[in-house]
Amino acid sequence: MGKKAYATASGRALAEAAQRIFHECELAEDSLRHFRDGWMGRVRVGTTNTALMYDLPPVLHQLSLDHPGIDLHVSNMATSESVERVLQNATDLALVTLPVQNRHLRVTPLRAQVLVAILPRGTRNPPDEITPDYVAHQRLLVEHAQGAVHALIMRWLSGQTPLPRSPMHLGTIEALKTAVEANLGMSIVPNVAVVERTAGLIVRPLRPRVPCTLALIEHYAKPNAPALEIVRSALLGLRDTGELKPARVGVRRRTSKP
């Protein structure tokens, strides 16, 4: 038209299609650039709050140093959510609290941990072992109801339910420890959370004993990949650190007078 050229309808359609092709080519080049720059793949890991706080930090640190090409995504979630996400292939590997039973999952126990009671330092005449009957008469602080540890505690207390006083729910183990130190009540936590003793807490074993074993789960049909194999091996390395020494969470005899 005059001195200007305009595309016909078919020409405009071709230009729009070409733009989409160029965009997809750029995306493909960006994706492959990851591999050229040492990118190995993405691995999605689910973990309980306890494992994230007390077990995973050194593992994640070493992975970041040795394998910077792995795009590692770590999400804190309850064991029940981790199981569902692994089954749906939304999570590749997950650290969970046993028991977990599902025929589609490969379950590998890592550390044999147990639950212990923590009480304020000023508690008068705490027993050498804490029983469900004793807990039923105390002010109890527990983690959120969706957590696996909460289910273990309530199963242990099943002979005393309904409790005379409803437990107070707090979100994290560290929040529970702080609340117990502040004399708001007693709590029950994994022994890994109190290996390093705190002056404001009394630690006692439970009777009967309550295991809360840390385990690694993945889908049986999960295809292997180099990045996944590396992360899996690093998490399985948690087995090699050994169990917590019973003496660290065992009975400490009372020395104060009633």
Image (cartoon, rainbow, N blue to C red):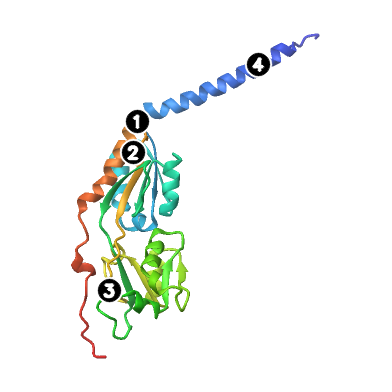
Q: SS for tag 1?
A: loop
Q: Residue furthest front?
A: 159
Compute the Cα span from label 4 to label 3. 74 Å
Compute the Cα span from label 3 to label 1. 49 Å
Is 212 placed above or below 81 here? below
Q: Earlier in the sequence, mark 1 or mark 4?
A: 4
Residue 38 is marked as 1
| Labels 3, 2: front one | 3
Q: Residue tagged by mark 4?
A: 15
Residue 258 in percent (x, y) is at 26, 91
Q: Earlier in the sequence, mark 4 or mark 3?
A: 4
Q: Residue tagged by mark 2?
A: 68
For image coordinates 81% across by 8% down, the residue present is 2
Q: Residue tagged by mark 3?
A: 204
Inspect the image, locate mark 1, and give the three-letter code of the amino acid beneath it.
Gly
Residue 22 in percent (x, y) is at 56, 20
CB contact under 8 Å: marks 4 and 3 = no
Between 208 and 59, the one nearer to me in the picture: 208
Q: Earlier in the sequence, mark 3 or mark 2?
A: 2
Between 216 and 131, the one nearer to me in the picture: 131
Q: SS for tag 2?
A: loop
Q: SS for tag 4?
A: helix
Is 148 placed above or below 17 here? below
| Labels 3, 1: front one | 3
For image coordinates 22% across by 74% down, the residue present is 251
Compute the Cα span from label 1 to label 2. 8 Å
Badge 4, how many Cα within 10 Å: few under 14, some, many 20+?
Answer: few
Residue 20 in percent (x, y) is at 60, 21
Inspect the image, locate mark 4, and give the three-letter code of the amino acid beneath it.
Ala
225 sits to left or right of 141: left
